[in-house]
């Protein structure tokens, strides 16, 4: 397992950690401010959200690389299933944005259950169909699609994938080289079969997301913990991820409306670096 105690070049910031993914939260920093602050602290990369990019994808991607970092990914496609599913054109626009940024990975949060259906089978079948239709379009633009399973508490309205095993089954059904999975500590920490599932994921892990699960979480969406403040076995999860061949960036993604989003962004970034070196 990699040693991060003296080297955090594999550390990437997901800008959600500063609150920039939701209106009315965070310090309102521009992408340029985020880039400069991360570069000054030795981050290796950044993951943006679509709402921050607008029509500036090429410009922002170039700015990241000029600062000596990488654009690690982009969050995310519109939902592909459920009552709030986006259109194919919207999904393709997200892929084009990722390509413009030079982001190698676009995250997919599936969306909820298909209207009029019960259980998950029909929704997962629909998800596989839509991903299969998008995969060639993404491949032409050198973008990989990362299916991210969510914690079961989001089942129904935000996801029809709740385990890595289910996400890998969709990958198998699609059968495209540029489709894989993203492993987010917040969503998988509870899964006692995770290591077993990841053992079959070699070559298909496209992202690893860090935060922590607070023992007494107050909000299922907006109360993620900083690494080391919760009960997730962070090093155990990374050990399983790396045993499956993953050697990429570790992306810190913390939704924290009442705690970290209220603190000065400089302090948040400094804490991220310190906790990454000591707890991850």
Image (cartoon, helix red, strand yellow):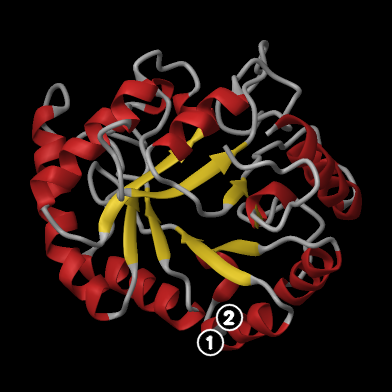
- Residue at left offset 70%, top offset 50%: 19
Q: Residues within 10 Å of mark 2 (few under 14, many from 20)?
A: many
Q: Is residue 156 visible?
A: no
Locate residue 251 relative to residue 243 in the image: left or right: right
Q: Secondary structure at mark 2?
A: helix
Q: In front here: 173 or 19?
A: 173
Whether label 2 touches label 1, CB < 8 Å = yes
Mark drawn on residue 46: none
| Camera-side residue of 100 and 248 | 248
Quadrant assignment for the N terminus: top right
For the residues labelled 2 and 1, the Cα–Cα distance comes to: 5 Å
213 is higher (above) or lower (below) than 72: above
Picture quadrant where residue 154 is located = top left
Q: Which mark is residue 58?
A: 1
Q: Give the structural element (helix, strand or loop) at label 1.
A: helix
Quadrant position of residue 13: bottom right
Residue drawn at the location 32% of the way across and 35% of the way down: 159
Residue under label 2, please give it: 61
């Amino acid at each position: 397992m990699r040693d991060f105690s003296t080297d955090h070049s594999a550390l990437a910031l997901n800008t959600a950690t500063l609150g920039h993914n939701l209106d009315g939260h965070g310090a309102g920093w521009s992408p340029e401010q985020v880039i400069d602050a991360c570069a000054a602290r030795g981050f290796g990369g950044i993951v943006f959200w679509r709402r921050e990019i607008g029509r500036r994808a090429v410009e922002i991607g170039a700015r990241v690389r000029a600062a000596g970092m990488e654009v690690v990914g982009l969050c995310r496609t519109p939902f592909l299933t459920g009552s709030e599913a986006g259109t194919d054109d919207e999904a393709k626009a997200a892929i084009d944005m990722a390509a413009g940024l030079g982001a190698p990975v676009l995250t997919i949060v599936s969306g909820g259950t298909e209207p009029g259906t019960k259980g998950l089978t029909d929704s997962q079948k629909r998800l596989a169909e839509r991903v299969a239709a998008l995969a060639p379009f993404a491949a032409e633009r050198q973008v990989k699609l990362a299916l991210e399973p969510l914690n079961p508490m989001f089942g129904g309205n935000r996801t029809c994938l709740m385990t890595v095993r289910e996400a890998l089954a969709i990958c198998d059904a699609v059968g495209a080289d540029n489709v894989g999975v993203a492993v987010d500590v917040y969503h998988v920490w509870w899964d006692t079969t995770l290591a077993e599932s990841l053992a079959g994921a070699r070559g298909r892990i496209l992202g690893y997301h860090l935060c922590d699960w607070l023992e007494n979480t107050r909000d299922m969406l907006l109360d993620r913990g900083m690494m080391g403040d919760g009960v997730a076995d962070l090093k155990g999860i990374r050990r399983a991820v790396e045993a499956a061949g993953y050697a990429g960036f570790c992306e810190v993604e913390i939704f924290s409306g009442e705690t970290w989003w209220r603190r000065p962004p400089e302090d948040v970034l400094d804490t991220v670096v310190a906790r990454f070196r000591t707890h991850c």
